[in-house]
Amino acid sequence: MNRYNFKSIETKWQNYWEKNKSFKVKTNPSQKKFYCLEMFPYPSGKIHMGHVRNYTIGDVLARYKSLQGYNVLHPMGWDSFGMPAENAAKQNNLDPKKWTEINISNMKTQLKKLGLSIDWDREISTCSKEYYKHQQAFFLELFEKKLVYRKENYVNWDPVDETVLANEQVIDGRGWRSGAIVERKKLNQWFFNISKFSQELLDGLEKLNNWPNKVKTMQKNWIGKSFGCEIDFKIEGELPIKNIKCFTTRPDTLFGFSFLALSVDHEVSKFFKDNKDFINFKEECSKTGTTEEAIAVGEKIGFKTNLLAVNPLNPKQKVPVYFANFVLMDYGFGAVFGCPAHDQRDFDFAKKYDLKIKTVVRPYDENENFEVRDEAYPGPGVMINSDFLNDLKVPDDSILETIKILEKRKLGKKQINFRLKDWGVSRQRYWGCPIPIAYDDQGKAYPIPKSMLPVELPENIDLNVKGNPLDNQKNWREIILAGKKLTRETDTLDTFVCSSWYYLRFCSPTETKYGFKKEDINYWMPVDQYIGGVEHAILHLLYSRFFMHALSYDDKDFNILEPFNGLFTQGMVCHETYKDPDNNWVSPDEIENIDGKKFLKKDKSKLISVGPSESMSKSKKNTIDPENIINNYGADAARLFILSDSPPEKDIQWSEEGIASSYKFIQKLWNLNKKIVDEINKDHNSNNDDELKKYTNKYLKKIHDNLESFSYNKIVANLYEMYSFLNKQIEKPYTKRTILENYQKILITMTPVVPHFANECLSTIQAKNFKWPEYDKSMLKEEIVNIVIQINGRKRGLIQSKPDMTEEKLFEIIKNDEKIMKYFDQKNIKKKIYIKDKLLNIII
Ligand code: ANZ
C-alpha cells in the first residue's frame, strides 16, 4: 500500500520552511509588491475554525502571488490587549501579560501547523511596549493636530464590564461583549475627532472598487449623511427663551406640526434643574439606552413645559413644548419638531399625550380626504392641507421648495448633518494602552513628552478591585513634569485603536524611532488584499480609514487616505447543532450516529435531537477544534475541505464526512503521483503528446481564472476533474519530457491549496525554483466545436465543425442537412442570430 503519511510529510515541510526562512519577505526592487493581510487574531487561547478559514484563504492568495513573482508581505500578529485577558487573569489569579503570552505561544504553534506562508520575523503584539509606545506617540501627534480632545459626555456604560462602550459596540441596547443592558452615564472622556472627516470618509468609499458593496453600504449608512434644514422656532412663555433651533429632513411637513420636543440635556433644561418632577423624569429617561435602536424600540415618554412654539409658516398656530426621551442631544440641535402623521416616533408620542395628528401628505393612490390613522405615513405622495405647499410632489419638490421659502423669509436654512459621532476611546480598564496624559490639580491635561514614552503599564498589580485597577496605583500615577506634580490618566485606550494602524507596523516591525519607516510605507501600502469577517464592516474598517485620514491630515510627508485597496469578507463556518432531551446543547464529539439517522450520546444515555446548522459558537457547543482535525486528517485535508464546500464569501457547512473525503482525496492524489512517476520512468515514444499539453493548458486557465476571481471552491473542483483525467489518461504513451513538464505545472498550481502535499510531489520529480505556470493561449483552441442549431429558439440539430466557421459557410452545411431543413422553408427566414462556435438561431 502506498499510504500518504501526512504527519511526517507535513512536519518535514514545516521544518524545512522554518529553517530556510522560505517566507521571508523579499523587497527586490525590480519586482512588484503584494501586501496580503488577514485580520489578526485576539489571543484567546486556541485557534478556531473561523481562523482556519480566514488564514487559509489568505494563504492561498499569498502563495499564488509569490509564485507569480511578486514580493509578498504576508505577516501575522496579535491583537493582544483587551478584556478577556483581564477577566481570565482575575478569575485565575494570574498576570494578564503571562496569560496572553502563553496563549500567543500556543496559537502560534497551531497556526504553524496549518502550513501558512507567514514571515514570522515580522510578528507583532499590540500589548508589547515596542508596539504601544508608537501608539502613544500617534495619540500625541493627533493631540497636537487637535484631532484628539477631552469632554464631559454621556456615555454608554456597561454595568457588568464596568466600562464605556462606543456606539458601535452597543448592539440592540446591550454591550457587545457582556450582553448587559447599557446605561447612560456622564464622564470625562477622550475622543478622536472622526466626525471631522465624515464627508471624506463617505467620498472615499466611491473609490474602493475592490470592496464588497454591502460593506460600503453599511459604512455609508453609519456615516449617515442627511440633507435637510435648520428651522428657527419662536418660543412664547414665562421663561427667558425666545428661539429654539431644530434640524429636520422634512421641513415640508411643517403644516402638520403638533409639538416641539427637546432632549433632557437641551440648554432649556437648566430652568428645570430644581424641578422635582423634571428630575424624576430625567432619571426615568436615563434608563433608555443612548443608541438609536434602544430609543426607537423603547417607550416614548415626555415632560410638558408651559412654553409654546410658533409654527414659522403659520404664526397663528402655537404648540406645546415637551422634553422627550427620544430626542438625542448629540444629533442636530437636540430638538425636534413633531409631525405625528408622518413620523412614527412622533406618532407614538402624540398618541400617548393626546396631541393633534394632522395629515399633510397623501400617497399617490389616495384622495384629498386621506387621513393617517393607525400608523404614521412617511412615504412619497402629494402635499395636502398645507396652504401654499399643496400639490407639491413629496419628497423631491416639497422639501426643496419649503427650504427655499424658509430661506427667503429668513426662518431657516439648508443644512447637511452626519450621524457619525466622534469616537470615544477612553476605557476604565487595566489591560490596554495607557493614555500618555497627566493632569494638574485643576484637571488641566498635559501631554507626556514623547521622549518619555512609552508610558508603561505597571505589572503584577492587584486586579481584584471594582472599577479600574490603575486608579489604585498611587506610585505609578504620581509624576513630576517640568517641576509640576501631576497625576497620570488612568483610562486606557479602546483596543480598536491598536488595530487601527497595525497594518502600518507590519511594514517596519522593528523600527524604533516612529511607528513605521516612510520608505517602507511608500513601498508596501496600501494593503492590496485585506481578508476578514464582515462583523468588522463598520467598527474596525472605519476606524482604520479614519486613522489614515488623521495621519495624513496636515502632513506633507504622509498622504495615504485609504489603508485597504481590496477587501474580501469571508463567510462563517457552520455546523449542525445538537440537544439532549433536557434542552441542553451537546457538542459534536459527545455524540454517536446510530443508523445514519439517529444520534445518541456516546454513553448511550440519551437520544439527541439534531438542530439546524449554525455558525460555530461556544454557546451552542457546535464547535470543532481545528487542532484535532489537523492531528487526525492533516493540515492539507483541512485546507482543502475549508475551501471546497462553498464560495469563500458564503457560509460553509462543516461535516465529518466532508473532511474525511478531503482526506481520502489526498490519498488518491498520492497514488496518482506514484502512477505518474512510474509512467515517467517508462519514457515512451509518442506522437500524441499534444493531448496532454492541451489538457494542461485548459486546466491552467481555469485555475488562473478561479484564483483571480476568489472562486476558491471551484479550484477544488478543478483538482477533482484533473484527478479523473490524469488517472484515466496517464497510461497513454506520452514522452517522459511531456509528462514531467505538464505534471510539474499541475503540481505547482496545487501548492497554494495543499502546500505540503504538492511540495512533496514536486520534490519527488526533482522540481526546483519553480514559478507560477502561465497557460499557452494557442493551446486552448478546440479542434472540433459543436454548434447548436435552433429554429425559433428550439434545438433542431447539432453540427460538428472546425472552429471559426463563418455564418454563410455554416448555412451552406445546414442546407444539405435534411433533418434540420424539414423544420423550415428558406423563404420564411426573418433573421439569423449566430454566436460563433456555439449557436445559430434561425427565426422564421
Ligand atoms: C420633523 C419631521 C417630520 C422629521 C417628519 C421627520 C419626519 P435623519 O434622517 O436621521 O437625519 N431629529 C432631528 N434631530 C434629532 C435629535 N436630536 N434626536 C432625535 N431625532 C432628531 O433624521 C432627521 C430627522 O430626525 C429630523 O426630521 C427630525 O425629525 C429628527 F415627518 O423633523 B424630522
Image: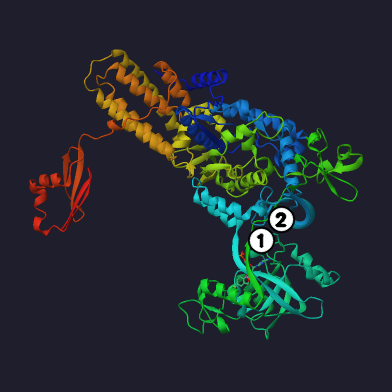
Residue 707 location, quadrant = top left
Secondary structure under badge 1? helix
Residue 826 location, quadrant = bottom left
Residue at x-position 71% and y-position 55%:
182
State the CA–CA distance, disc 2 to disc 1. Answer: 9 Å
Secondary structure under badge 2? loop
Residue under label 2, please give it: 182
Asked whether the viewer can see residue 3, the reply is: no
Mark 2 CB within 8 Å of ligand 1: no
Q: Residue 96: horizontal and vertical position, in percent?
A: 74, 35
Which quadrant, please, contains the C terminus?
bottom left
Rendered image coloring scheme: rainbow
Q: Are marks 2 and 1 in contact (CB under 8 Å)?
A: yes
Nearer-the-camera pick, 368 or 671? 368
| Residue type at tag 2 | Val
Relative height, residue 184 to residue 56 (above, below): below
Is residue 458 shown left or right of residue 500?
A: right
Relative height, residue 190 to residue 453 (above, below): below
| Disc number for residue 483 | none
Question: Where in the image, quadrant-wise, is ligand 1 located?
Answer: bottom right
Nearer-the-camera pick, 431 or 231? 231
Is residue 562 shown left or right of residue 764?
A: right
Residue at x-position 71% and y-position 67%:
325
The number of discs equals: 2
Mark 1 CB within 8 Å of ligand 1: no
Residue 111 location, quadrant = top right
Q: Residue 684: horizontal and vertical position, in percent?
A: 25, 15
Nearer-the-camera pick, 409 or 684? 409
Residue under label 1, please give it: 294
Outermost bottom residue? 316
Q: Residue 771: horizontal and vertical position, in percent?
A: 43, 24
